[in-house]
Amino acid sequence: MIELYYVETLDLPGHENMAWDCVLGELVDDVTLRFYTWQRPTLSLGKHQDDSDLDLEYVRSNGFDVVRRPSGGRAVLHWDEITYAVLVPRSSELFGTSVLELYKLISELIVEGLREQGYPVEIIDGRRKALTSVCFQVPSSYEIVLNGVKVVGSAQTRTGEYVLQHGSIILKPHKEVKYCFKSTKSLQIPLIGLYDVLEVPVEGIMASIKESFEKVFGPARPLPPELLERVRSLVGERAWRFVWRRG
């Protein structure tokens, strides 16, 4: 059976959150499920996303941080949410699965956990792509919707050593995301969060999704202390790489 590590890192700066995702991929030899939250509202841009449309004055006046993700896709405003990351190392049998196969598996496990808490979420089987800078404009293949509206947005990146999929599980939506870009201020973006239906404590949601992963991967283990220390040390060295710099 595939073994599973489990990590929680709450209320970290955005650039450290991104570094954690990558360092775990580099150092950990088993599949890892991580949940995290953000120290302050943070706009994350996809690795190759054009930032020329960014309304920097609006972003700064509202005190939002801006980071570059290691994954592709479009912008997400991380605020009232639980963010998840799944790391699959090269040594895992899952490493060879396709992008969509892994999306489907992870979405199914998240849906199972959310339904256990009473959320009537579903997986969308579509291939629509957003036409703007904002990730949550429309759902893509195997993404998760609530009342027909995207409530979990995910992105994936692959290296020669690991696969990373991470994404936002929205608790409370924030329309401010569309004001972060010059071209989307008047755009109608359907937004919904889990708490529009039912308010379950964050700890309960994380525990429920963790349990659904354990049904596939077996009991989750914390990182060994010496490995955790190595991860933290390397995060400190790598975090600066994800700080957004204009141009």
Image (spheres, rainbow, N blue to C red):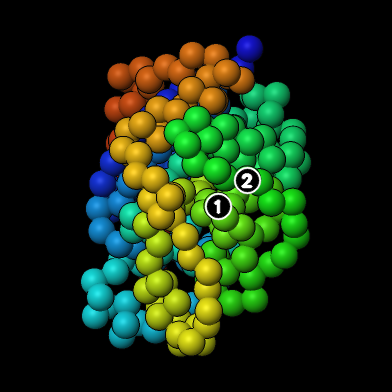
Q: Is residue 26 visible?
A: no
Q: Choose top left, top right, bottom left or bottom right for residue 224.
A: top left
**In the image, is residue 244 above or below residue 58?**
above
How many residues crowd mark 2 within 10 Å: few (<14), some (14–19), many (20+)?
many
- Percent across and percent down for residue 119 are 49, 41
- Percent across and percent down for residue 83 are 42, 46
- Percent across and percent down for residue 1 are 63, 12
Query: Mark 1 — residue?
Result: 146
**Do the CB atoms of the residues marked 1 and 2 lie less than 8 Å apart?**
yes
**In the image, is residue 183 above or below residue 71?**
below
**Quadrant the C terminus occupies:** bottom left
Q: Is residue 31 visible?
A: yes
Q: Choose top left, top right, bottom left or bottom right for residue 66.
A: bottom left
- Please, what is the three-letter code of the amino acid marked with disc 2? Glu
Q: CA distance from mark 1 to mark 2?
A: 7 Å
Q: Choose top left, top right, bottom left or bottom right for residue 235.
A: top left
Query: Mark 2 — residue?
Result: 122
Of callouts 1 and 2, the N-terminal one: 2
**In the image, is residue 227 above or below residue 175?**
above
- Percent across and percent down for residue 187 are 52, 82
